[in-house]
Image (spheres, rainbow, N blue to C red):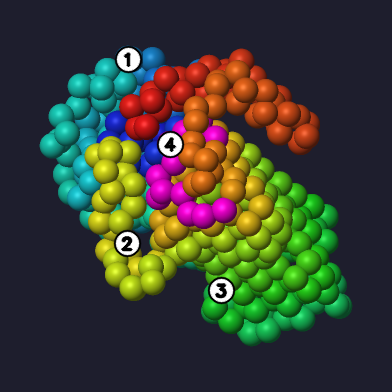
Amino acid sequence: MKIVLFDTPEVYENLLPLSYTRPVGAFRIGLVTIRDKWEHFIPGEYSWLPKDYLREKFPLDCQESEEALFIAGNKLPDMAVALEASQLKPGDALRDASGIWAFKGTLAQFIKLDSGFGRESANGSRRINYVFDIFLNNAEEIHNDYVWYIRDRKGISPDSSVTLLGDLRLDNGLPALFIEPGAKVMGCTINLSDGPVYIGRNAQVMEGACLRGPIAICNDAQIKMGAKIYGGTTFGPFCKVGGEISNTVIFGYSNKAHDGYLGNAVIGEWCNIGAGTNSSNLKNDYSKIRIWNYATQRFMRTDLQFCGLIMGDHSKAGINCMFNTATVVGVGVNFHGAGFPRQFIPSFQNGSPESGFSDVSIDTFMQVASRVMGRRGLELTDTDRHIFECINSSASRFK
C-alpha cells in the first residue's frame, strides 16, 4: 500500500522555522521521526506531500489516479490510531479537532477534498500543531517508542563503572536501560526511576555525566563529561551535548557541547550553541508565555509557564549568549555578543543586541553551511541550495 504523509499550509506555517527545511513527518520526537513511527505501525511504500519547494528532496511517489492512504504528517500514531487508518475504505476520511488526518483514495480525490469531509475519529487527537508541542509530548513519545523499538533488539550490559538508580525493569518487563552495541557508557550515573533511557549505536556517555530518564540518545551522539541531562530529552544522531539540559529535543547533527542551560526547547539540525550560553524557559513573574507565530506574524498565547529556545537549522550562538524566554530563531542565524536579543530573530541574520542585526547573504550562508556539513563528511547538495534559496526568498516577509 502506498502511504503519503501530507502537510497542510496551516501546519507548515505554525511549525516554522523547523518546517522550513523538512516535512513535519521528518520531525524527530521520542526515539525516532514521526514517519518512522507510522512505518512501524503500518508498513508500506511511504512518500511525502510537503511544501512545494521541499518536494525535490522529499518526493511524492503517487500518480493522480493511484490509490493511497493519505496521513497527516503531524499526527502521532499508536496502535489504535494506525488500525483505524488502515481500515479505511476507498473514499473515506477521518477527522479530529484539527481537521482531516487520514484519507483513502486517489491523489486527485485528495487534492479536491473538502476540509469538512470525513467522520470523527474514534481515537484521541495527538498532533504536533505548534513548535512547543514537540517538547510537551516528548517524554510520552520516548515511553511509547521505547516499548516497540527495543522489543526484538539485543543490547549490551552497562560497564561496571556505571551507577544505576531506580528499577532496572519497566512494568511491562522490558529493561529500563537499553544500550546498543558499539556504544561507550562509562563512569556515569543513570536514574531510571521516572522512565527508560535509550543509548544508540556508537553513542558515547562520558564519565561524570548524570542522566535521569526518560531520555533518548541516538546513534553517534556524545554526552560530555559532567553533563546533567533531565527527563523528556532526545538527542538526535551525531549531536554533542554538555552542560544542563531538560525536556529538550535536538533533531540531529547539532552541538551544545559546553556548560550552559537549555530547557523546554527544540533545536534543528546543524546548529551550534557556544560555551556558557543560557536560555531562559521561565518568566521572572511566572506569567503565561507568549511565543512568535509565523502564521499570524505576531506573538501568540501558549498558556505555558515553561518554554525555552526554538532554533531553526544552521543557526548558531556564540559564547556566553543569553536567550530570553521562548525565543524563536530562524534558519541561518549567527547570534553573538552580550545582552538579550528580541524574542524573534528572522532567518539569515547576523549580529548582536549591542550592534544590531544585518542580513546574511545567501552566498555567505552557503559557504558556511558547506564547511559545517563537510566536517561530518556530508555535502551541501544542489537540492539543499535550492531549498535555502526558497527559504531566503520567503523569509523576507517576516523581518
Number of marks in the image? 4
Q: Amino acid at mark 4?
A: Pro
Depth check, mark 3 against mark 4: the one in front is 4
Highlighted range, magenta: 338-350
Query: Picture coordinates of residue 382 (x, y %)?
Result: 61, 15
Q: Amino acid at mark 3?
A: Gly
Residue at x 25% of width, y 22% of height = 111
Q: Amino acid at mark 2?
A: Ile
Residue at x 16% of width, y 44% of height = 119
| In-image side of 90 versus 56 (left or right) | left
Q: Secondary structure at mark 3?
A: loop
Q: Amino acid at mark 1?
A: Ser
Relative depth, front residue between 82 and 250 = 250
| In-image side of 358 versus 314 (left or right) | left
Q: Earlier in the sequence, mark 1 or mark 3?
A: 1
Q: Work out how far the residue at label 2 is from the one at label 4, CA to CA, in angstroms.
A: 20 Å
Q: Kindly identify which residue carries mark 1.
A: 65
The quadrant holding residue 286 is bottom left
Residue at x 85% of width, y 77% of height = 161
Q: Are marks 1 and 4 in contact (CB under 8 Å)?
A: no
Q: Earlier in the sequence, mark 3 or mark 4?
A: 3
Depth check, mark 3 against mark 2: the one in front is 2
Q: Work out how far the residue at label 3 is from the one at label 2, CA to CA, in angstroms.
A: 28 Å
Depth check, mark 1 against mark 3: the one in front is 3
Q: Kindly identify which residue carries mark 3.
A: 195
